[in-house]
Each structure stands twice: as structure tokens, then as C-alpha cells.
Amino acid sequence: MKLRAKCLLVGDAAVGKSSLICSDGTLKNYSMTTGVELVVKCINIPETPHSVEFYIFDSAGKEALVDACEKLWGEPSLFCLVFDLTNEQSFVNCGRWLERIRRHCRGFRVPGVLLGNKSDLSGRREVQASVAKEWAQSQGLEYHETSAKEMDSSDAPLLSLARAYYSLYQEDCVAAKNLTLG
Amino acid sequence: MTDSSFSSLDAKVVLASSSDESHPPENIVDGNINTFWMSTGMFPQEFIIRFPEPTTISALTVDSYNVKKLKIEKNISQSASQFESVTEKEFESTEGHLQTNAISLNPGSATHLRFIITSGYDHFVSVHKVSIKK
Ligand SMILES: Nc1nc2c(ncn2[C@@H]2O[C@H](COP(=O)(O)OP(=O)(O)O)[C@@H](O)[C@H]2O)c(=O)[nH]1
Ligand SMILES: [Mg+2]
């Protein structure tokens, strides 16, 4: 069975959102994303015959384009909030991004992950893992550190989102089985 | 209820936008509210029901869960295309029990009915039974 999820990919410009999601793992030359790009990615859930097809909405993260991007943010199933470990301001701004995301969640349970990216640049780190992790937990998010330079590191966060989404699906199936007549 | 269920009419679901083998679309027309079709994420979601011959329908009942907005279309063609709009409904949300909604239609003949769920009260919605009154 294949579940389908609309996944918002959000965070400041240049934190590495597009690089993370680009499937071959190689770094593209720097180019500022304009508006929103849609990337489709399928993740298998290990030890099950099931998978989740992610419709990833990669938003530029440029302040001037935020209003235009937000028009495409309706009814998300999941989200990835990304900051740059070598840029403290991009972490501070996560609170504002999260508020914006939540305005589109209509009270649904929308699983999310916080990604500290560019973990390969360890010498330039400005945000400590413990601080990021604590904030993520306080917001109900799972925390991962990633590097767009390392092939597989972007699949771990998607896999955890896929698992969370699949368990919401299972809960809804159980609820549907146990309904009484209206 | 005196409504005849779809199963006795030999109607079939010929298309559905989601398919979980454990909760297949045939469950919508098996006449049993305990079995259901489950959508597998994102909106819109749709399914199309075909009658073996043009059938006059004056009303429908839909048993569902977490469906918010539903559009119904029909045609009187042999193929599942070129639909005309019939009606659009917003269902109330329910907690722990089925949404049962009767929908009256302008009497007319149809060979296909298309149900488009444009939004829900949760990520996933279920449709348990559709029945018609001639
Ligand atoms: N060293 C390093 N550079 C990265 C990483 N991810 C992205 N970059 C670079 O950061 C810049 C911005 O990346 P981009 O994906 O366009 O960011 P976006 O605006 O958030 O989509 C580019 O020059 C990337 O090559 C990473 O994990 N490590
Ligand atoms: Mg980008």
C-alpha cells in the first residue's frame, strides 16, 4: 500500500533545503529558489510492504516570497523545518517558521522534524546539538542533524516522518472499524 | 430504511484514487457499513460507481467518517468520462460514530456517479456505504 503525504520543506534561504532533497546527493551550484518547487520522493517503510509518497513543497525561504509560498502550503500532512548549524540566526528564525506552518494545519496532527543541516562543517558550528534538540522536543518535533554532502543523511528524517504518518493511518483505520451508527 | 443498497443493483466501483488492499473500494457498494474504503492521504480523493444500465436516482445516502466536502457528478455514458455536476455538500464532523447523510437529487438517469471528496476532518477519510433510492 502507498500512502501519500504533502510535506512542507521550510526554513531560511540558503540553509540547504533544496540540496537536501535533491535525490542524487550532490551539491548543486548555489541558486536561490524562487517561490516553491515540488519534488516527489517515495520512501519504503522497512519490514512492511508499505511506502509513503512524499509531495515535497520546497519553499524559497526568502522573506519577500513568503506570502506567495504560503498560498501553496494549505493542508500539509508533514513538514521538515531546516536550519543551518553554522548560522545561529537561521535557528532563531525557526520559531517564526513554525508559527507559519501551524497556521495551515487546521488542528490536524501534523508530524514534523527539525533538521540541523551542514553538519560536515563542524569547525563552523554555531548551534549546539543539545540546544536544538531541547527546543525541538519542546515543540513536539524530532531532531536530526544532516549534511547534503552525505548521501543517505536526508533519508533518515523522511523515514521517521513516513513512520509517524503510517501510524496515524493505522489509528484512523482502527477508528473507522470501531464506529457506531450515527 | 427502505433504500435498496447498491449491491442488490449490481453496481461496481470502477475507479478509486486510493487503494489499500485491506480496505478496497468494493467495500463502498457491498451493502455493509462495517466494511469501508479508506483514503490513503491528501485531497481531493474520488471514486466512480457504475450501474449496469441507466438508472433513475432520486436520493442517495452516504455513510462515511471524517468527510468534510463532497461533490457528486454523474453521466449517462458507457465510459467514465464527461461528467456533469449534480450537487456539493458539506458534512458535519462526528466523533466515534458514522456520518450518515441523505442527499436528494433532481430525478434523472445515470450510468456513472462520481464522488469527489475535496476536504476532510482528518488526513484520512473512510466511506462505508453508498445507497440509493430510485
Ligand atoms: N557544506 C555544506 N554545504 C551545503 C549543505 N547543504 C547545502 N549547502 C550549500 O549551501 C548553499 C545553499 O543551499 P540550498 O540547497 O540552495 O539552500 P536552500 O535555499 O535552503 O534551498 C549551497 O551553496 C549549497 O551547496 C551541507 O550540508 N554542507
Ligand atoms: Mg532552495
Image (tube, rainbow, N blue to C red):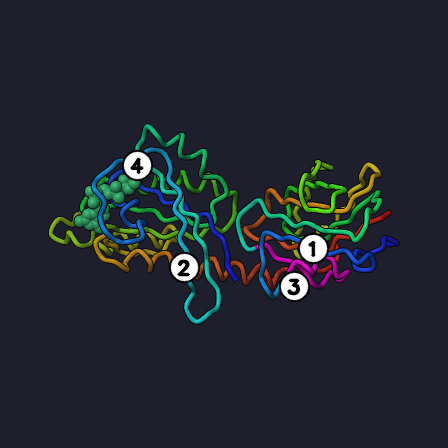
Mark 4 vs ligand 2: CB below 8 Å: yes
Q: Do the residues indicated by labels 3 and 2 lie within the same chain of the protein?
A: yes
Chain containing mark 1: B
Mark 2 closeness class: few <14, some 14–19, many ≥20 residues within 10 Å? some
Closer mark to the observer between disc 4 and disc 3: 4
Tag 1: residue type? Val
Find the magenta span and give its range. Answer: B24-39
Tag 2: residue type? Ile
Q: Which residue is more in the foreground, A171 or A166?
A: A166
Which image quadrant for residue B98?
A: bottom right
User: Residue under circle 1?
Assistant: B13
* Residue indicated by mark 3: A177
Q: Position of residue B1 (x, y in %)?
A: 86, 54
Measured in 3D between alpha carbons, the distance from the residue under mark 1 to the one under mark 4, in whole angstroms, is 43 Å
Q: Earlier in the sequence, mark 2 or mark 4?
A: 4
Label 4 crowd (10 A; few <14 / some 14-19 / many >=20): some
Element under disc 3: helix
Q: Is B63 or A178 nearer to us in this picture?
A: B63
Contact between marks 2 and 1 (CB within 8 A): the answer is no
Crowd rating for badge 3 (residues with CA inside 10 Å; few <14, some 14–19, many 20+): some
